[in-house]
Amino acid sequence: SATTLFTLPGEVVQRRAVCSANAGHICSVLGDSAGGAPAGTYGALTATADAASGSATMWTILLRQAG
């Protein structure tokens, strides 16, 4: 419940961040690579919260360019 922001890795451009003030205190951040990603494996990037927590749920969504 103490998290108020995330620090993103240098390869990621933050587009939007929000933390709720309700009892569930959900924080989220949306970012992208600001361009195309190379073919093959991409990832192993970590966002860091400004407060420690014993529980968290995280996910990554990858979108493939039409072509």
Image (spheres, grey):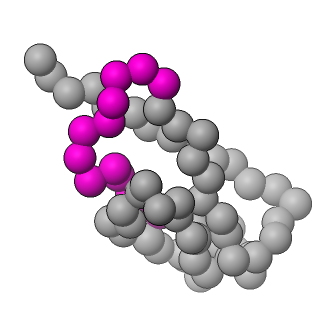
What residue is rendered at 36% in x and 62% in y?
13
Image quadrant assignment for residue 51 = bottom right
Magenta residues (range): 29-41
Q: Is residue 27 above or below residue 51?
A: above
Can you see residue 28?
A: no
Residue occupying the far left of the picture: 67
Was residue 39 drawn as part of the magenta stretch in this picture? yes
Q: In this view, does 59 lie above or below 42?
A: below
Residue occupying the far right of the picture: 54
What residue is rendered at 61% in x and 81% in y?
4
Image quarter of the N terminus? bottom right
**In the displayed structure image, the side of residue 58 where residue 32 appears, left or right:** left
Residue 22 image position (x, y, % from top left): 62, 77
What residue is rendered at 66% in x and 65% in y?
48
Majority SS type along the magenta span: loop
Residue 47 image position (x, y, % from top left): 60, 59
Can you see residue 47?
A: yes
Image quadrant assignment for residue 5 = bottom right
Was residue 33 drawn as part of the magenta stretch in this picture? yes
Residue 67 image position (x, y, % from top left): 12, 17
What residue is rendered at 47% in x and 73% in y?
18
Q: How many numbered marks have been drawn onto this rendered protein structure?
A: 0
The residue closer to the viewer here, 57 or 43, is 43
Residue 11 image position (x, y, % from top left): 43, 55
